Image: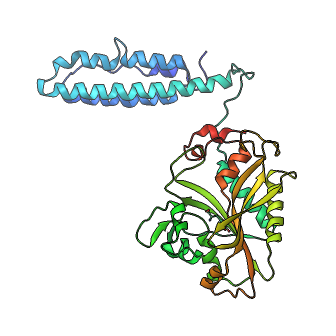
Amino acid sequence: MFAAGCGASRLAAASSFPMKDRTGPSMLQEAEAIETRALEEIGRADDPSDLEDIRIRYMGKNGDLTRILRSVGKAAPEDRPRIGQRVNQAKQAIGEALEARRAACETGRESASGTLDVTLPGRRPPLGSKHPLTLIREEVSEIFRDMGFSVVDGPEVEWDYYNFEALNIPRDHPARDTQDTFYLGSDIVLRTHTSPVQVRVMEQQQPPVRVIVPGRTYRNENPDATHAFTFHQCEGLYVDKGVTMAQLKGDMTYFAQRLFGGKVKVRFLPDFFPFTEPSVQYDFSCVACGGGGCRICKNTGWLEISGAGMVDPAVFGFVDYDPELYTGYAFGMGLDRLAMFKYGIESIHMFLENDLRLLERP
Ligand code: DAH
C-alpha cells in the first residue's frame, strides 16, 4: 500500500527523541533537530497516509514537539518563552511542509493511479487575444500596404504648428473650435487628429509620397456611445504628379470593399476642411443592412466615415512642395468607428474599459 520510496520501515526508523535532561538549551536544540528530521521525512514521503503518520508522530497528542511544550515548565523561567517560540516555529514549518507535500502527492496519484477522469472537459488555459483596435489597425494597414502605402507614426504630444498652423488653421480660425483641444502649453497640444503627420512626412520627403498614419488622438469631447476623450484615426496621404479626386474615390472604394466586402459603395458629400480643397465627407453604404436602412445607419443606408479631399496648395506652401507640379489627396478615418462596424461593438468606451469579455468575442 505504500508507494515506492515511502516504506513503513523508513518511517519507523524516525523514532522519538529521548526526553531526558530537560534543561532550556537542550530543549531548544531538540526542537531544532526534530524540525530538521521531520522535514527530511516529509520530503521523502509520497503517500498521504505516511504524511499523516508523520504529523501524528511530531505534532499529535503525544508527538515529540507536543511533549517538549508540555515539559517546558521544567526549564528555567527565563528560557521558557524562547523554547515555546522555537517549538511553535517548528510546528508551523512542519505543518506547511506537510500541506505542500500532501498536495503534491494528490496530484501525482491522480494521474499515476489512473483515477483521472479523462472524459471531463480539459482545463483551458486562458489565452490572450488581440484587441479589436489592434485587429482593425493591422487590417487597415495591410490593405493600404498592398496599395503601395507605407505605414508611419507621429507624436501624440504635438506642436500647435503641426496640429493646426501648417494645416492652414491659424490661431483664430473658427475650425479650431470644432476640435475641443487639450492644450498642454500655449504651443503644445495632445494631437486632435493624425493630420499633423502629413506635414511631418512632407517636410522629410519629396513626392511621390504615399503614407498612412494610424494612431491615437485626443479631444475634450462630451462622452457618449460614439465619442470618447481619446480615440484612433488613420490618416492617408498620396502626393505625386497628377493625383486626382477620381483616384481618391477609386482607392477608397477598393479599401472599403476589402475591409467590408465587395458590395460596399462609397459616396462623397461636399464638406469643408482648411487643409483640403475641395473637401468631402465620405460615407460607406451601411455594412450592417447593405444600404436598405437599419438602426446602425439610422435608416439612411449610409455610414459616415470621415473627411477627405485634395491637399490644399496652402499646405504645400508650408512644406515647400510646388503646387504647380504636384497634387495630392488626403483622408482621415476613425479606426474606432471602423472596428465598431466591423466587429459589432456598440460603444466606443468598450475599447478602453479592459473588460476581457470584449477580447473573448469571436
Ligand atoms: N483631420 C480631420 C478630422 O479629424 C479628418 C480629415 C479630413 C483628414 C480631411 C484628412 C482630410 O486628411 O483630408 O476631423
**From the viewer's perspective, is residue 209 above or below residue 304?**
below
Q: Position of residue 152 (x, y in %)?
A: 66, 70
Report the residue at 73% width, 39% height from top: 362
Q: For this rendering, which residue is in front, 282 or 3?
A: 282
The total of numbered circles placed on residues is 0
Q: Which colour scheme is used?
A: rainbow
Residue furthest to the right in view is 262
Q: In which quarter of the image is residue 258?
A: bottom right
Q: Nearer the viewer, residue 27 or 182?
A: 182
Q: Nearer the viewer, residue 25 or 352?
A: 352
**Residue 25: horizontal and vertical position, in percent?**
20, 30
Above or below for 153 versus 229: below
Please give the name of the residue rendered at 52% of the width and 16% of the height, measured from the top-left corner: 49
Q: Position of residue 227 (x, y in %)?
A: 57, 49
Q: Nearer the viewer, residue 186 or 95?
A: 186
* Residue furthest out toward the left: 77
Where does the N terminus fall, quadrant-wise? Answer: top right
Q: Which residue lies furthest to the top in this view?
A: 61
Judge whether 71 appears above or below 103 on screen.
Answer: above
Image region (quadrant) for ligand 1:
bottom right
Task: From the top left corner, tell me how far across and down residue 23 is, in percent.
Answer: 18, 25
In the rendered image, is residue 238 in sight? no
Q: Determine the residue positioned at 54% across, 63% down.
A: 192
**Position of 236 compared to 89: left or right?**
right
Q: In which quarter of the image is residue 205?
A: bottom right
Q: Can residue 147 be seen in this view?
A: yes
Which residue is rendered at x = 55% and y = 28% of the image? 104
Residue 207 vertical position relative to residue 221 in the rendered view, above or below: below
